Amino acid sequence: MALIFESKNFTVEAPDRPHVDRLDGGHIVINPKIMAEDRTQLSSALGKELMMLTMVVGEAMKVGLSRRGIDIGRINYQDNGNWRHELHVHLYGRAKSATKQRYGEALSFPKPEKGYYEGLSPLDADDIASVQSEIERLLATDKYRNF
């Protein structure tokens, strides 16, 4: 996974084997640095930080990837834990021009062994840099500065 951002308690990463191809909107994962089965095991402070990160990273993903020519219409946020039974939050970009994970339809995630994810492209270095710069900008705004 490529590191996009790190706070004291969480990492934000772009998976090398994404669930959504970069041109279909891309895939980012927020992971806590502590082991927790789900969000109910977080302290209120960690819960607030996780919520703030989903907001910041989602906004940065939408703006940053749009700047890169990926026509993001919205971000889907999912905390599933089906394949890995520990807390992590997926952010899936939903590109209006998506060809596999079509915009306006529910995302589909077949079991990994079925080969569906082979050949999906992860976010590239320029995509990541664009999202990173937008995260930095957003964290300096009144909305997020004292979250």
Image (cartoon, rainbow, N blue to C red):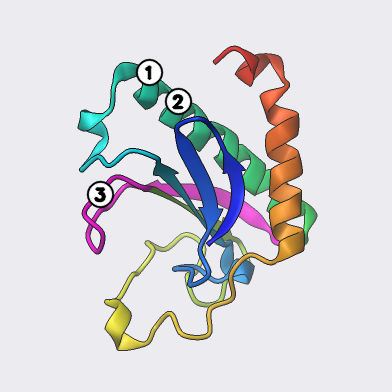
Give the answer, above or below, for where 129 lies relative to 134. Answer: below
Distance, label 3 to label 2, CA atoms, is 17 Å
Tell me the number on the disc at residue 45: 1
Residue at point 48%, 72% (across, down): 17
Mark sitting earlier along the chain (1/3) = 1
Viewport quadrant of the C terminus:
top right
Residue at point 72%, 59% (across, down): 127
**Mark 1 residue crowding within 10 angstroms, few (<14) / some (14–19) / many (20+):** few
State the SS at label 2. helix
Distance, label 1 to label 2, CA atoms, is 6 Å
State the SS at label 3. loop
Magenta span covers which residues? 70-88
Residue linked to disc 3 = 86
Mark sitting earlier along the chain (3/2) = 2
- Image x and y of residue 86, in percent: 25, 49
Give yes or no for contact between labels 1 and 2 (Cβ–Cβ under 8 Å).
Answer: yes
